[in-house]
Amino acid sequence: VRIIVADCSAEYSGRLNASLPLAKRVLLIKADNSLLIFSELGSYKPLNWMAAPCTIKDITPEHADDDVTTEVPQKVIRASADKSNDVLEVTLQHIYSDETYDLGEDPGLIKDGVEDHLQKYLAEQIERIGEGATLVRREYPTAIGPVDIMAIDGSGKHVAIEIKRNGGIDGVEQLTRYCELLNRDPLLAPVRGIFAAQTITPQARVLAQDRGFDCLILDYDEMKGAEDDSLRLF
């Protein structure tokens, strides 16, 4: 990976046109030639970027200097998309640091509290959806994919549960499709839905309630602790 700290400006042209005025920023050039521009503050997302596959050209203009006050830049980095006419051109007026590091092979992120763990804990602690609830099965098969959990509530009604780490509108739409399909089966209907997640956006909550679904917030640490307690002999 190549990391550049510089006073720079940038112009993006192609599918859209965007520009960044001159300011001190960090440029990240990855091994696949992806180019990302970051500022000191704000979102974790880059201000602008060119994703792979792309070609990087490192241009040193004639009479290049590192004086910010002159029009001649110290360097220009041009990233051109391989499959379109998109171009991101970064003009570096003054470079404070330009370093390259070999990061080696990354083993990837090992997540704790992912949906599979949430599903496992909720299946083991199914009464969190209501007193008297019983588990039918995890990954209940349907023609359009498996429902995370199928259960029967205390009143004997089937319940389809969709589980997300962060619950958004897409998850509600997914649960809607499952419930519409399951309710066509006279042996299961009526099937109600529960949208369960560690966090649920306000928009998703409104949509879920409009569809007649209950929303359930899952506290991963509490659920994990409950399982740990169940394994203690004393």
Image: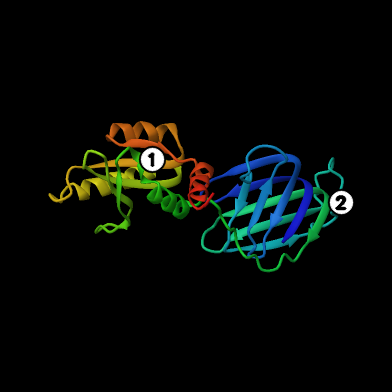
Q: Residue at x 41, y 51 (%)?
A: 119
Say above or below: 64 vs 126. Answer: below
Mark nearest the camera among 2 and 1 is 1
Q: Earlier in the sequence, mark 2 or mark 1?
A: 2
**Which element is circle 2 on?**
loop
According to the picture, the residue beneath numbered tag 1 turns out to be: 128
Query: Could you tell me if the residues under marks 2 and 1 are in contact, i.e. CB atoms within 8 Å?
Result: no
Q: Residue at x 74, y 54 (%)?
A: 76
Quick one: 11 or 62, which is closer to the camera? Answer: 11
Instruction: Give residue 179's position: percent from left, percent from top.
Output: 25, 46
Residue farthest toward the front in the current orientation of the protein = 234
| Quadrant in which the N terminus appears | bottom right
- As shown in the figure, which amino acid type bears the numbered disc 2? Asp
Which residue is the extreme one toward the bottom? 105
**Crowd around label 2: few <14 · some 14–19 · many ≥20 (10 Å):** some
Residue 106 appears in which quarter of the rendering? bottom right
Mark 2 lies on residue: 65
Q: Residues within 10 Å of mark 1 (few under 14, many from 20)?
A: some
Q: How many marks?
A: 2
Farthest residue to the left: give it: 186
